Structure formats: C-alpha cells, structure tokens
Amino acid sequence: MPLKVYRARSMTDALAEVKKDLGADAVILHTRSYKSPGILGLGSRNMFEITATNDQPELAKRPERKALRAAPERPTTATPAARQLSGAVAARAYAGAGSSGGGTALAEPPAKAEPFKPEGPRPKLVREPAFEPPRVMSVADSRQDKVVAAPVGPGIEDELLSIKRMLGRVLATSSQSASSRQGSMPDALFEHYLALTEQSVASEIADEIVGRVRDELSAAELADEEIVRETMLRQIAKLVPTAGDSPLPRRPADGRPLTIALIGPTGVGKTTTLAKLAAVAKLRHGRSVGLVTTDTYRIAAVEQLRTYADIIGLPLKVVASPGEMRGALESLEHCDVILIDTAGRSQHDGERLDDLRAYLDEADPHETHLVLSTTSAESVMLRAAERFARLGPNRLILTKLDEAVNFGVLLSITRNAEIKLSYVTTGQEVPDHIEAGKPDRISRLILCGPQA
C-alpha cells in the first residue's frame, strides 16, 4: 500500500493537495501539526502534514473473508466419541490414584476401559472470523461535519471527537499566525531576530531589540545586512549593564584594603573564580592580595584554596565563625586587596542565607559579587538572583561560558538581576580564563553564538 506525505501551511491546503494528487476517494491515514525548527514569535510557522494513500487496507481486500463469515459456528456439545474419550482418561486417572502408596481411590473405575474409536466422520475445523478493521475517513468525508462510525469497543467516539477538536484548535492557531505575519519584518532583520531566538533570548526582549533597530534605521538601511547586524549588536550592548574594567584601586576612600566577597549557590565555581581574581590582581595589576575563606563546610575546600594561595604566594586566613572575621581582616591590613570566599548556599535555604549575612556584616566588603553558572537553567538563575538579593550584591560574575548551551540567558539575568556584570569566566585555567564583562563582547556572544 504506497503511502504519500503532504505538507502545507494550513490543513485546507494539505487536503487540497491530497485530493488533487490521489482523488476524492483517497484514504487519510494520519494527520499532525508542528512548528518548523528554529522559528518562534513573529516568525513562527505552523505546518500541517497528512499521510494518505489511494489504496484500501489489505485486510479489507482479502476474498476469503466472506467464506469465513459464512462458516457454521463451532459446536459446543460433546460428540459420543468425545464423551467416550473423556471416560477413558478419567478411568486411568482414578486407577493411578488408587495404586499409589497408601492412597485411597476416589471412585471405583471401570474394569476395563474400551479403546477410543472415533465414530463417524471427523468434524471440520472452523476458523474464527478475522477482525475487520474500521473504515478510514476519506478526503470526501473530511469536508463534512461527521465522523464515520467504527464498529469497535467503547471510547472510540470520545477519542475521535477529541481529535476533531484538536484539529479545530490547530486551524484557529494557523489563522492567527497567518494574520500576525502580515506585518513581517525585512529579511535582514528577520534573520537576526531568528538568531536571537535560537540563542534562547526571551521573546519580549527580542521584540524590544528588533523594535529599536526598526525605529533607528531607514527602509534602505534595513535592507543592508551589515548595517542591521551592527545596529543589533549596539542595541543588545545597551541592555547589558557592566561594571567596567578599570584597574583595581590600591586603597578605597575609607583607607581599608579593597575588600571583595564572592557569594552564590553551591557548585557555581566561586573558589576557582576567586583564585583567578587573585592571580589577575597580583600578576597583571601588581597588587598585594590576601585571601580569606569561610567555607569550612565543604570537604577539602580550605585545602583547595590553600593550594592556590601557595602557588601564587598569597597569605590565607580561615574563618570558622562571624566573630573571627574582623580579626582575620585586621591581620591582612597591609594588603591592597582582600578576597573573601564564602560557602555555597542553596537559594531555598533561608536559614543558611542568614548565616552568610552574618559573615558579610562583619566583613563589610566594598564589593559583593554574586556568582552564577551559565550552565544552569534560566529559571534557576533568576530564582537564585532573587533570593541572594537580600544579601545586597552589587556585582555579578557569570561562570562557565565555555559550557553554556546558549547565551540568551545572559540578557535575561543581567536585566532582571539589576546588578552590573563584573566578570565572566570561560574555562578552568588560572588566571587566563577570566575576563571583564564588556557589553560588546556579550552582545557578540548573544547574536553570533560560540563562534563569536
């Protein structure tokens, strides 16, 4: 039975193609609707697919079905020969029970069972009637508001009614999408809009960027792909607040060492990021650096940071309680920069977050950097930023960009967290795989993906 697949922008067009190719008696075997890959929002395209054939199912065409239906029913009463056979079998069973060791016979068997001799002709075997498949809806039937009844079990009518309602909703959605495409954007702008959606930029942010570009450029400029690309990059960069990359000051205005604390959920890479910042401050900016860690909960956390400190040649202080924080900071007053590593805390654990606040209150850092991993889901990152906001972070560090699936989350996080992006990390090497957060760099990642 040859099958053919027809695809079109609407169910009506697909049915028309089926009827045109196979005729009004074509048999529809399957229908479905789907979205073409990579197209969302204004560019979404609902497609409809019909699998059909011009041949009837093989089961319905076999000629022997009539003969099977006309065959007599299977006899239900036993023949004399069958009754005689049953008696012989029962006799042998009773005899065996009576002769077993210590057993008691259930009944007196006959003295001698007669051998079985069939009487009369052997009855003919009759096959059960084969299952007859229900009739499949044809193209002509699909034009009408009726469903062909199928001689099968209960529940099929409800299932067919559910399918009919689903097709109605699909057709309604298709008409809405068609009307939204009437004001389609220029090709060059639309291609970059698709690039944003492929990077999982939120639809409302992508629409805002496209709207700004459309308002800024003339019709002739919107037709130039290079101009559109540069304008898109510029508009994306405006949505990324950054802290800049000015050199670290030797001493803030209050005369204390520049004190920076890193906070965030577990497993986002705070300790490795702290080691990178320490190496950058000492090796690239020539600052004297001291390290403080409060992460006495995680196994080998202190040893990990101590290894970094020994390699770079930095003093390290371990603080086990908030009361020890000030003494540790006073012992490092000769340093230009003090970096504080804190234990990872779940954004759902309010009690642990309050403990972390006690450490920060004692340290009174000039900068508190919230560290988030770009490998986490956007909803998880947004929830963490919301919960850690109670600790007053004023900087944001995004880690593991080399492992991120897409970069659209950078826009959502920097915009919703309402704090400036300070650094991003792109690997595990110390100190190379860290860089200051720059709007133009982030915009290229978002628009062009990993190849940027």
Image (cartoon, helix red, strand yellow):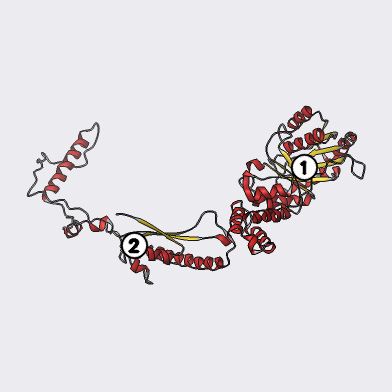
Query: For numbered disc 2, what is the local secondary structure?
Result: helix
Give the left or right position of residue 36, taking residue 150 as reference.
Answer: right
Residue 442 coordinates in the image, percent (x, y): 69, 48
Q: Which amino acid does label 2 sit on?
A: Asp
Of 387 and 446, the residue lying toward us: 446
Residue lying at the far bottom of the rendered structure: 145
Give the left or right position of residue 258, taking residue 201 as reference.
Answer: right
Which one is in front in this view, the residue at disc 1 or the one at disc 2?
2
Residue 206 coordinates in the image, percent (x, y): 64, 58
| Residue designated by label 2 | 21
Query: For numbered disc 1, what is the local secondary structure?
Result: strand
Q: What residue type is labelled 1?
A: Leu
Image point 84% across, 38% down: which residue? 338
Regarding residue 407, the answer to whether it shows in the image is yes
- Residue 110 versus residue 385 in the image, above or below: above
| Residue designated by label 1 | 262
In this rendering, the count of numbered labels is 2
**Label 2 crowding class (10 Å Cα cut-off): few <14, some 14-19, many 20+?**
some
**Label 1 crowding class (10 Å Cα cut-off): few <14, some 14-19, many 20+?**
many
**Which quadrant of the rendered structure holds the N terminus?**
bottom left
Residue 10 sits in quarter:
bottom left
Of 51 and 43, the residue lying toward us: 43
Of 86 and 388, the residue lying toward us: 388
